[in-house]
Amino acid sequence: MSGIPRFIWTDEVLRQVETLAGYGLTQEKICAVLGISRMTLTRGKKNTEKLSDALARGQAKGEAAAGRSLFDRVKDGDVGAIKWYEMTRCGRWEASRHDVTQETTVKVRVVPHAE
């Protein structure tokens, strides 16, 4: 069989995928880093359970690290972090009201009524 050689999902490549997913890279960007097509990744996920696991594990680790960092800032009293935490993690939203006033000039032409 000739053509492009089949991509091998080695343990080293899977670790790299997990790391990149943890950094928040999209699957498209992960493909670019690895030098593979989106189709190769899609086929890999279907044929290699470890690949799907590496993507999911990396994403979860990245979210956990970001959450830990955010929570550390909350504990330190960072007001912006506290607001963000309350909005995204506690479901609290700040109600705001915006009054908008606009002046408009309207030109009216009076047409005499013909009898």
Image: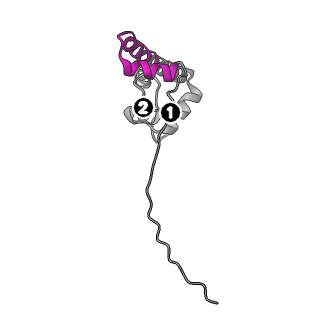
Q: Give coordinates of residue 21: x percent, y percent.
A: 44, 25
109 lies above or below 61: below
Q: Give coordinates of residue 74: x percent, y percent.
A: 40, 13
Q: Is residue 14 visible?
A: no
26 lies above or below 74: below
Q: Which residue is mark 2?
A: 30
Pick whichever of labels 1 and 2 is earlier in the sequence: 2
Q: Nearer the viewer, residue 109 or 62?
A: 109
**Mark 1 packing: few (<14 Cα in 10 Å), some, or many (20+)?**
many
Range of residues picked out in magenta: 63-89
Q: Give coordinates of residue 110: x percent, y percent.
A: 52, 78
Q: Give coordinates of residue 37: x percent, y percent.
A: 46, 39
Q: Can residue 73 be found in the magenta stretch?
A: yes
Q: Residue at position x 49%, y 36% from top?
A: 97
Q: Which residue is mark 1?
A: 41
In the rendered image, the quadrant that contains the C terminus is bottom right
Q: Amino acid at mark 2?
A: Ile
47 lies above or below 71: below
Q: CA distance from mark 1 to mark 2?
A: 9 Å
Q: Residue at position x 42%, y 23% from top?
A: 13
Q: Which mark is residue 70?
A: none
User: Which label sits in the foreground, 1 or 2?
Assistant: 2
Q: Can residue 112 be found in the magenta stretch?
A: no
The image quarter in which residue 67 lies:
top left
Whether pointer 1 and pointer 2 mark residues with C-beta atoms closer than 8 Å, the reply is: yes
Q: Residue furthest top?
A: 75
